[in-house]
Image (tube, rainbow, N blue to C red):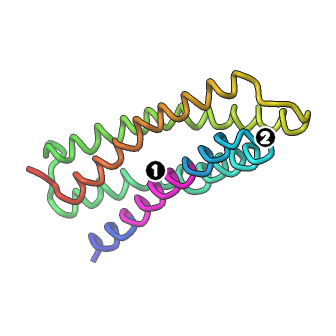
Amino acid sequence: MPYLFLKCIHVISSTVLFGTGVGSAFYMLRANLSKDVPSIYFASRNVVLADWLFTTPAVIIQPLTGFLMMREAGYSMTDAWILWSLALYALAGAAWLPVVCIQVRMREMAREAYEALTPLPRAYWRLAFAWVALGCVAFPALVAVFLLMVFKPS
């Protein structure tokens, strides 16, 4: 029973992590492509909020439940699929941490432009490019973690 409970929490938190990331990326990208400052400000505020409410707890819950399930099921930290999963999760995390800071800066630039009724500065668009580039690292890394978790190759 403890294993199934942990697995349920693990699957739900991975769904929240992945779903929030994909949803946030979609809405932020769509807002940026519109170049509409009010839309960008709205999207950036909510992307930052979603990261704090959903992504951050899921990022913490994932390794905790994963390690507990590993122990319950008798897997070893030296199993290749676990080592690869951890490495890819760390890579995704290394891409996500700067994204959090970038999103906050983008939100502030969007707020300033919105309040001043001015266009977004060039610095905003440089950050938006970095945001997309880091997402292009994190997204496939998490997809690979999903595949490793499901198939557990030896």
Magenta-colored span: 10-24
Q: Is 138 rendered above or below residue 20?
A: above
**Mark 2 is on which residue type?**
Val
Residue 57 location (% of width, % of height): 52, 54
Disc 1 residue type?
Answer: Ile
Q: Residue at x 30, y 54 (%)?
A: 146
State the predominant SS element of the stretch in magenta: helix
Nearest-to-viewer mark from 1 and 2: 2
Q: Position of residue 148 (x, y in %)?
A: 22, 51
Q: Does residue 13 sit above or below 108 in this rendering?
A: below
Mark 1, Cα crowd under 10 Å, few <14 / some 14-19 / many 20+, is few
Q: Which dot marks residue 37? A: 2
**Which residue occupies 62% across, 27% down?**
127
The quadrant holding residue 12 is bottom left
* Rendering coords of residue 58 (x, y %): 47, 55
Residue at disc 1, secondary structure:
helix
Mark 2 falls on what kind of element?
helix
Mark 2 nearby-residue class (10 Å; few <14, some 14–19, many ≥20): many
- Reading the image, the residue beneath label 1 is 60
In-front residue for pair 70/122: 122
Q: Is residue 35 magenta?
A: no
Nearer-the-camera pick, 6 or 28: 28
